[in-house]
């Protein structure tokens, strides 16, 4: 991921700016995007709350990639395959849908805890 909220970016790129602008919006009247967790090459990930109060992590395919049918299909397939992995370290995909602008998204379990970047910052450097 090229953006993480704790990084000190001088100026976010266009993709990150667009992802940040989505914070506060609601997808399909269901998922309120509360916080941007990160931006990668294909998608942005948000902490979100469903209208029923359930929390989740929404992975939203970047709009320019959503224009490609194969890219959308591959993105959704990722979620379906993830649910076939029976391992305690695998995140479950709870929902998938298409946003009003045509962007495809997956909703996964929201795991609370420390990111790798945060853990690295708090650990003493070892040689």
Image (cartoon, grey):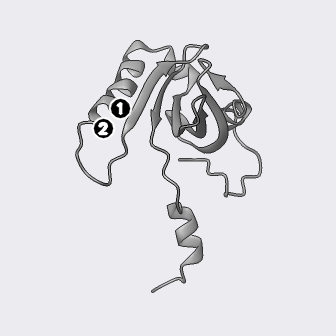
34 versus 96 height, above or below: below
Outermost residue on the bottom side: it is 127
Looking at the picture, how far across and down is residue 120, in whole percent?
A: 53, 71
Which of the 4 quarters of the picture holds residue 12? top right
Asked whether 56 or 7 is in front, the reply is: 56
26 lies above or below 19: above
Question: Are the two marked residues, 1 and 2, in contact with CB atoms closer than 8 angstroms?
Answer: yes
Q: Mark 1: few, some, or many residues within 10 Å (few <14, many ≥20)?
A: many
Residue carrying label 1: 79
Q: Residue at x 38, y 35 (%)?
A: 93
Q: Secondary structure at mark 2?
A: helix
Residue assigned mark 2? 82
Q: Is residue 42 left or right of residue 89?
A: right
Q: Nearer the viewer, residue 117 or 51?
A: 51
**Could you say which disc has been placed on residue 32 in the image?**
none
Q: Position of residue 80 (x, y in %)?
A: 30, 29
């Amino acid at each position: 991921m090229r953006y993480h909220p704790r990084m000190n970016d001088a100026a976010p790129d266009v993709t990150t700016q667009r992802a940040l602008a989505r914070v506060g919006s609601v997808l399909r009247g269901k998922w309120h995007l509360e916080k941007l967790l990160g931006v990668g090459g294909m998608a942005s990930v948000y902490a979100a709350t469903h209208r029923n109060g359930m929390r989740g992590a929404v992975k939203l395919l970047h709009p320019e990639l959503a224009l490609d049918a194969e890219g959308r299909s591959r993105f959704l397939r990722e979620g379906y395959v993830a649910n076939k992995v029976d391992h305690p370290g695998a995140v479950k995909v709870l929902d998938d849908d298409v946003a009003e602008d045509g962007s495809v998204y997956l909703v996964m379990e929201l795991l609370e805890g420390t990111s790798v970047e945060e853990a690295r910052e708090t650990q003493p450097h070892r040689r």
